[in-house]
Image (cartoon, rainbow, N blue to C red):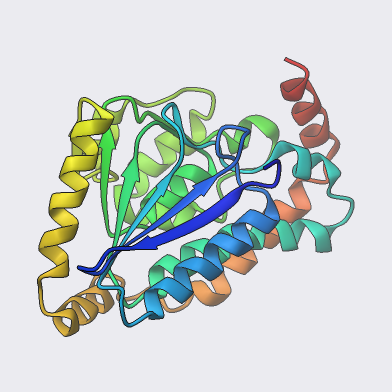
Amino acid sequence: MTTGTVTTHTTPEGISTIRFFHPSHNSLPGALLTQLAATITQTAQAEATKVIVLESEGEKTFCAGASFDELIAIEDAAQGLEFFSGFAKVINACRTSPKIIIGRVQGKAIGGGVGVAAATDYCFATTNASVKLSELVVGIGPFVVGPAVERKIGTAAFAQLALDASEFRPAEWALQKGLYAELHDSAEALDAAVLAFARKLAAYNPEALTDLKRVIWQGTDHWDTLLPERAAISGRLVLSDFTRDAIRQFKSR
């Protein structure tokens, strides 16, 4: 249980739900990132899948981003690159999926969690789903998730979120900027809206959906190299004394 889980379920109508979980606020250690990316790719290629719902377990936090336990354990740039490449793999798996991915964000999205939400094609959230790019606080920066977030909300809003790294923006702000497509007052209402929309998509022409997905993500083919390059930046910065001290202080709170 300490390593987290990724599970999948496909309904007879072709709605495939991918759910990830980690006991530490749904943070994403390297192994879980790799598993999540592989699961997205495999599920998207399955003939039985018509649409994907990406969600996490629990109520309060959608995803707390990187695992601080793993960050503090990184000893060299190669390990740093390997860890942050996990987020690159998840984002690229979402981007290259031939199936539309619906995001279900039931609670706070922090750091890499914002990137995961931004990598979905249509994202539902609750009014409790505030967002924060906290990387700068610990001396890194939202380099890997940046392209996905900036693509969704624009450069100005991305700069606000990235630079004001210690503060949450409310879900209403994320809705206005385009990260979220809809907000709902409860998890029950969220689930009903996600299911209704997924059923609509599952009934559409699958070939048309695949072509539309390709159009939506047009101009991002270079992310196969861009995101690993960004991962190398974070992998280098995580070795700094500033970052190591900041993470230790955060963990001791």
Name the one closer to the observer, 213 or 39: 39
Picture quarter containing residue 207? Answer: bottom left
Residue that lies at the very extreme toward the right in this rendered image? 75
Q: Residue at x 16, y 68 (%)?
A: 202
Q: Residue at x 28, y 60 (%)?
A: 121
Q: Is residue 1 left or right of residue 248?
A: left
Picture quarter containing residue 140? Answer: top right
Name the one closer to the observer, 8 or 209: 8
Counting from the top left corner in percent of width and height, residue 61 is at 46, 31
Counting from the top left corner in percent of width and height, residue 239 is at 83, 46
Counting from the top left corner in percent of width and height, residue 4 is at 63, 46
Q: Is residue 72 left or right of residue 201?
A: right
Quadrant position of the C terminus in the picture: top right
Q: How many marks?
A: 0
Q: Residue at x 54, y 60 (%)?
A: 36
Name the one closer to the observer, 212 or 76: 212
Counting from the top left corner in percent of width and height, residue 80 is at 77, 56
Q: Is residue 95 left or right of residue 182?
A: right
Q: Residue at x 39, y 69 (%)?
A: 95
Picture quarter containing residue 177? Answer: top left
